[in-house]
Amino acid sequence: MKLPEDQVRELARLFPGVQQADEGGVTFFLIPQLSLPAGCVPERVDAVLCPTPRDGYPSRLFLAEQVRSRSWGTARILERNWYMVSWRVREGLRLAQMVLAHLDAFK
């Protein structure tokens, strides 16, 4: 899926080191060492943003580690295991806004 270049650049500015990858016709964004909200353990974790609908959600954010007790699920993406929480963000957000909205699950 082709995503707007201005949004991809914005995502890269906010999250240094972000990498775009495709798997099974889906575009993902690997965000290394994403800073989590205050009080989270760990404070930083690798994350993957799926900006397109998946599993009945308009977008998903997957983390390399569980952060705290919630409704956790798992997925295998880009040859790694990832954790996800049951958290819905509204549709129509820019890529960077999606990441920030997903982080609200940990506040």
Image (spheres, grey):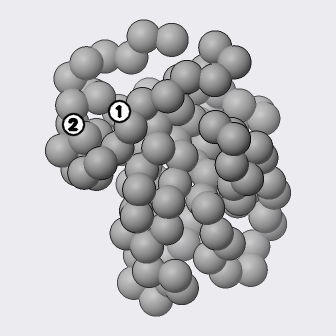
State the residue at coordinates (18%, 44%). 13
The amino acid sitting under disc 1 is Arg
Q: Does dot 1 land on a helix, a strand or a loop?
A: loop
**Extreme residue toward the front, this view:** 79
The amino acid sitting under disc 2 is Glu
Residue beneath disc 2: 10
Residue 93 showing in the rendered view: no
86, above or below 55, in the image: below
State the residue at coordinates (78%, 64%). 72
State the residue at coordinates (61%, 43%). 60
Residue 7 showing in the rendered view: yes
Residue 51 coordinates in the image, percent (x, y):
52, 31
Residue beneath disc 1: 94
Residue 44 coordinates in the image, percent (x, y):
43, 73
* Mark 1 crowdedness (10 Å alpha carbons): few <14, some 14-19, many ≥20: some
Residue 98 coordinates in the image, percent (x, y):
43, 43
Residue 70, picture quadrant = bottom right
Residue 7, picture quadrant = top left
